[in-house]
Amino acid sequence: MLFLIGKILGEIILAFVLILSLNVIILARTGLWSIGHIGFFGLGMLFSGLAMSNGVNPWLAGAMGLAGSAGSAALVGAASLRLKNDYFLILSIGFVYIVHAMNLSLSSINGFSGLSRPWPFGTGFEQALLLLGAMLLPAIALVLWLHFRLRQSSLDAICALARENEDAAQALGVSTPWLRWHLFFWGSLVACWAGIVFTFYTMGTSPERCSMASGIMLFACMILGGIGTVTGSILGSLAFVLVPRLLELTLVDGLGWSFNASHSAQIIFGCMLISLLLLRKGADHG
Amino acid sequence: MELIWDQIALAGAIALVAFGFTLLYSVARFINFAHQSTISVSAYACYWAHIILGLGILPSIGIALVIATLFGILEYCLVFRSFIGRPAHLLVVASFGVSLIVESGLAMIFGTANKSLGIEDPLVSISGVSFYVRDIYVWCALIVIIPVIVLYLRRARFGLLAQAIPVNIRQVRIWGLSVNPPMILVFGLSALLAGLAGIYLGIGWSVFPGMGLKWGIWAFSVAIIGGLGSLYGSLLGAAVVALPLLLAYRFGGAVMADGILFLFTAGVLLVRPQGLFPLRMRRI
């Protein structure tokens, strides 16, 4: 039981890092619908897994993974300077497919396994949770600090202006592409870091984690929670992890129905996404 | 030799789906990712009619095409109709929601295992060149249906109305015309094309819930490379990009053919977002 709670807690923290960085840094401030956020998670996972499976020290592998994915984040961010709205969305979707295909072809269909954890952390499950907390809580703190600092500074108003009326912002002398690039880059880097930590946490990689379907579900949960707020991100990550779990616990184990809980969760998230997009007029501008 | 013809026909099937993507884009101005689920829907419908109900091959194909077309129309009536006039990125994300629902639904009903349509496809020989029957089917679809659709859109009054929607939807409404009938037509037609491709892919390869995603992504890349909304662009894109990659994959053992395709697509998007063979807007 304790093991199950710990596992769910770990999943929630991972989902929270992803949703929070996408929600408060990228989507709310730049207005870029970066549905490919999960791709950065996959990239961090792939690079660090690849390095470790070639015998590189885990710390060094983590650093290499971060450097590699930072380069990719910089490139995709540079693309955001040229493309906006649905064209950026298409590029972002293509990015997820590339990362997913790379994950599948560079490792096996189930990803790498049997990797090691960085030095002070051992192989037990408590150690895994400790590692997750030690590595992700600072990232969460950093994102929250950035979020609240931005909210107090005049930069936030400039972000809003750049999102609503780019010409007006540029007339004020703000380099809006540069601002957008920065926010996108740092938000994506957090997702890469989550991917690297995931590799340490599970001592392996898992290509299905960065598939388009999980990216869409993450996005649906983020919109469900609420765009641009920390509470929304918490609610979203809770829904992302708990809905499939609860379905499995109540209907499959409790009532003995025989169906696949994760598929039905996908259907629920899909319906939820469509109805939320329909109902929330405010979602138009992120 | 028949393998080369088979790869050409596969590129043709991808072109059919890509044509559906661009057809939808040329009227509704968004990329409909639920379009690729139509491939899975028609393949599973064919499987249901042929294997589970035990009908013959031709009736099963007919039923599958009808179901695919109805699926396209239903998609519009239930979901996308309410989104008309909203920003395109919302429609793209919503279409992903639809494809998530459809593919998980199929996986729940039929299971995730690979299925075979169990249709034997004999090799036929015409003056020394051997084909599979399914290849001829794709070629007929490409040569007959696409020119008819293009002619209809360019010449018929209803087709012109469909083309007027993206240019000036307000004007269309001021004229007292409903947006729905042309939209239903376009959704139905593009679903029919994806349905045709889905049956071909189901016969030649296996049927599984993710098959729409697997092949739809090729079609999506081809549509982008060819130029979104440009009707013949998707066919040219398939011939210029998908075919060489498929041949290299099949005969040269090129790994990551899809990765190369996506990178190329990303490059096209960045350098030339309107595609290689862009659409010229007509003022109506």
Image (spheres, coloured by chain):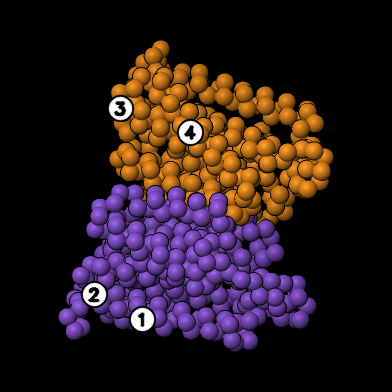
Query: Residue B5: where, in percent of width, then height?
Result: 27, 71
Q: How many numbered callouts?
A: 4
In the rendered structure, are the residues bearing label 1 and label 4 in contact, judged by CB atoms less than 8 Å apart?
Answer: no
**Secondary structure category for the residue under label 2:** strand
- Amino acid tagged 4: Ser
Q: Which residue is mark 2?
A: B132
In the rendered structure, are the residues bearing label 3 and label 4 in contact, judged by CB atoms less than 8 Å apart?
Answer: no
Q: Residue furthest bottom?
A: B156
Label 3 CA crowd tier, 10 Å (few <14, some 14–19, many 20+)? few
Which chain is mark 3 on?
A
The answer to whether residue A257 is visible is no
Which chain is mark 4 on?
A
Q: Which residue is mark 3?
A: A54
What whole-number distance in Å separates the C-alpha atoms at marks 3 and 4?
Answer: 18 Å
Q: Quadrant of residue A200?
A: top left
Query: Residue A108: where, in percent of width, then height?
Result: 30, 40
- Amino acid tagged 1: Cys
Q: Taking B263 as reference, is A121 above or below it?
A: above
What whole-number distance in Å separates the C-alpha atoms at marks 3 and 2?
Answer: 45 Å
Q: Residue furthest top?
A: A120
Label 2 CA crowd tier, 10 Å (few <14, some 14–19, many 20+)? some
Which chain is mark 1 on?
B
From the viewer's perspective, is B83 left or right of B109?
right
What whole-number distance in Å separates the C-alpha atoms at marks 1 and 2?
Answer: 13 Å
Label 1 CA crowd tier, 10 Å (few <14, some 14–19, many 20+)? few
Quick one: which chain is orange?
A
- Amino acid tagged 3: Asn
The picture's colour for chain B is purple
Label 4 CA crowd tier, 10 Å (few <14, some 14–19, many 20+)? many
What whole-number distance in Å separates the C-alpha atoms at marks 1 and 3?
Answer: 51 Å
